[in-house]
Amino acid sequence: MNQSLHHIQQAYDASAEAYAEKFLNELEHKPLDRQLLERFAASVGNAARVLDLGCGPGHTTSYLASLGLDPLGLDLAPGMIAQANGSFPSLRFEVGDFSDLRYPDQAFSGCLAFYCIVHLRREDLTPVFREMRRVLCAGGLLLLSFHVGSTPVIADDFLQSGCSLEFHPFPVDVIESALDEAGFVDVEPLVREPYPTEYPSQRCYLFARRGNDE
Ligand SMILES: C[S@@+](CC[C@H](N)C(=O)[O-])C[C@H]1O[C@@H](n2cnc3c(N)ncnc32)[C@H](O)[C@@H]1O
């Protein structure tokens, strides 16, 4: 299946309410996610500008704000951004595509990308990571999460939205190579087993720093 950006956007628009219902409070039950977000926040520093890419209903954006950061949530699907604005009216959210960011070079101290690369193909990874690197300041930090694996999974009726979506898990070394190609350094992956309530795939969390320009 070759999914267009338009198809992905429509699927998340159609499932935005159900997605928010299922995931808005998930961090309460995910101690490792909270711990890694706290490490991310401590590392970028108080009040740092950070970009939450593919923010969905905004729960990670809100958590970053609660840790003292100045986050901007970005998502392709206007329906997701409507959910985020409804749940967190004091925070900033924008509709946009992370493969073509409209922000200047080095605009952010950190980028969070939780499960938003799940629809990319291998060949899309490096250009997308280059775009993330472009908007990070010198020494800026990326925290990424993704499903580990090598076989695409098709959800025929994603969250009963009537839309099908194809998800692409990746081997950890494939993501490491793409980050290296894009100019990230100090790549530090951590893999955990799924919780009983989650989709049964291993999860990888990965910190990486923007390398210096050549
Ligand atoms: C699996 S959800 C993850 C949402 C949230 N980060 C979380 O952890 O629950 C993937 C999100 O990425 C967004 N997304 C997919 N492709 C995108 C793109 N090219 N630019 C911006 N957002 C994108 C989708 O609209 C969706 O909200």
Image: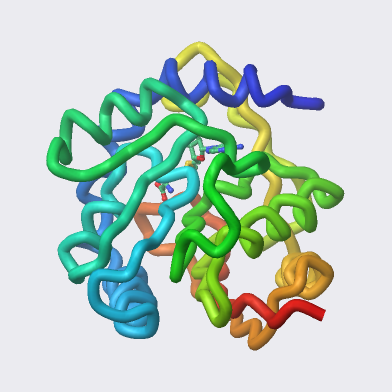
Side of 34 relative to 212 (left or right):
left
From the viewer's perspective, is residue 69 above or below residue 38?
above
Q: Which of the two residues, 101 or 85, is positioned nearer the viewer here?
A: 101
From the viewer's perspective, is residue 21 above or below residue 53?
above
Residue at x 48% of width, y 49% of height: 53
Residue closest to the far bottom: 186
Q: Quadrant of residue 167?
A: top right
Residue at x 48% of width, y 43% of height: 54
The C terminus appears in which quarter of the rendering?
Answer: bottom right
Q: Quadrant of residue 27?
A: bottom left
Q: Is residue 175 visible to us here?
A: yes
Residue at x 27% of width, y 60% of height: 70
Number of marks in picture: 0
The N terminus appears in which quarter of the rendering?
Answer: top right
Q: Quadrant of residue 201?
A: bottom right
Residue 186 lies, in percent from the top left, at: 64, 87
Residue closest to the far top: 162
Q: Which of the two residues, 26 or 84, is positioned nearer the viewer here?
A: 84
Residue 185 lies, in percent from the top left, at: 69, 83
Residue 57 lies, in percent from the top left, at: 31, 38
From the viewer's perspective, is residue 37 above or below residue 119?
below
Q: Is residue 203 visible to us here?
A: no
From the viewer's perspective, is residue 96 above or below residue 30?
above
Residue 124 lies, in percent from the top left, at: 79, 47
Residue at x 44% of width, y 70% of height: 109
